[in-house]
Image: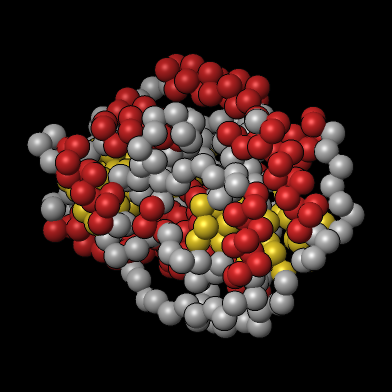
Amino acid sequence: MKSKVYFFIGTKAQAIKCLPVIKYFVDKLEIEIIDSGQHRKIVDEIYTSLNLNIEKNILSNNKNNISTYKSGFSWFIKFLFKQLSLRTLPKSNSKSICLVHGDTVSTLLGLLWAKRNSLKVLHLESGLTSNSLLNPFPEEIIRRIVSRYSDILICFDKSSEEYLIDKYSNKNKFIEKVSENTISEMIDLNPVKIEKNLITVTMHRTENLVSSKIFKTFCQLLNDLSEVYKINWYLHEPTKNYLDKYKIALSRKINVLPLLPHDEFILEIKKSSLVITDGGSIQEECYLLNKPTVLWRKKTERQYATNNNMFLSKFNIEAVHSFIRENINSEQKEAKFDYKPSKEIYEFLKNKNLIN
C-alpha cells in the first residue's frame, strides 16, 4: 500500500514552495492537499493551473484572502472550532505524513490538525531563526513551536542544520539538510535583459505595516527614490489597506501595480536593476538570482540567503541610499544552478523507512 502525504497549505508562498515536492511525489505516493483557506483565492489559482489529479480538502469556506488582523483572528477561531467538531481521519495501515511549511498561522494549524489525526509531521524549511523570540512576530514563535512538535525536520542550510541538531538531536526526530530551498526548482534561469534604473518593490510584513513610523519612512524612501529611478511597487492587499489607513500620499512617479503570478514576478525580478523587499521568499529568490537587494527589515532568519548583494537595512535610510547608489546598475552575475531538493526529500523519507 502506498504511503499518503497530506500537504497542509494556506498561503501563496507555501503553495509555491510545496509545488515542486507535490510534482515529484505525485506518481510515487498518494497525495492530498489540505487547504486552510488563509490565502484561499491565490492558492486556488495556483493549484487550478496544475492540471494534476490530486485530492483536495478545503477546511475553511473563506472565499477571500485573509488580509487584516480582525479577519485573521476570526478565521483562526472558526477554524479551530470546526476542526474540534469534525471526526478524525479513518485509521490506515499505510505510513502517512502531514507536510507543513514555514512559519505562518497555517503552519501552526497544520501541526494541530496532523496531531489530532495521529500523523507524523514533516516541517519543511525548519531551523530558520532570527534569534529573537518576538522579531518577527508571530513567525519566530510559530517556527519554534512547529519544529519542537514535528517528527521530521527538513532544512536547507548548514546553520539551520546545526541549530536543529543542537536543539533536537536527542528528541527522537529525523533531521535532514537538502541542497537548497525547494523554491529553487520554481525559478526559470533563462537570461533576460536588465532594465537600467528599475527598482522592483514589495512590502507586506505585519510588523512593518502596524508601525506607522516604519511604514511612513518606507513610503518616503520610495517617494525620494522615484525622483531618480523607476519604481514598480507590487502591492499586497494588507499594504493597500494601511496606505489608506495612514492617508499616505505617494508620488505619482511610483508605479503601483497588482501582484503577479509567481512566474511573471520572477521575470520582473530578473529584469530589475535592484529589489527592495521585506519578504522572506523574495529574499531567497533574489539570493539565488544574484540580484542586488535591500531587505526592509531589522533582522532576518535567512542568514544563509545573504551575500554582498543583500543589504539588511535595519531601517537606516542613509545606508539604504548609499547601497542603492553603489549597486543599482552594477554588473550582475548570471544565475546557474540545478538543485533537486524535492528528489532528496523523497529519497531521505524512503531510506529512513518513513514512507512505503
Is 280 in front, or is 86? 280
Q: Position of residue 82 (x, y in %)?
A: 49, 20
Above-or-below relation of 60 to 34:
above
Q: Position of residue 161 (x, y in %)?
A: 23, 51
| Number of numbered callouts drawn | 0
Name the residue at 48% across, 35% down.
Answer: 136
Could you tell whether 338 is left or right of 139 in the image?
left
Is 198 in front, or is 145? 198
Above-or-below relation of 309 to 164:
below
Location of residue 292 by image quarter: bottom right
Could you tell whether 151 is left or right of 297 in the image?
left
Name the residue at 60% across, 35% down.
Answer: 206
Q: Position of residue 93 (x, y in %)?
A: 19, 40
Mark yes or no: residue 213 visible.
Answer: yes
Q: Position of residue 325 (x, y in %)?
A: 66, 67
User: Outermost residue, right direction?
Assistant: 252
Mark yes or no: residue 173 visible.
Answer: no
Is 82 in front, or is 147? 147
Above-or-below relation of 86 to 189:
above
Could you tell whether 176 is left or right of 37 in the image?
left
User: Outermost residue, left direction?
Assistant: 170
Name the residue at 19% across, 37% down.
Answer: 167
Name the residue at 39% across, 34% down.
Answer: 132
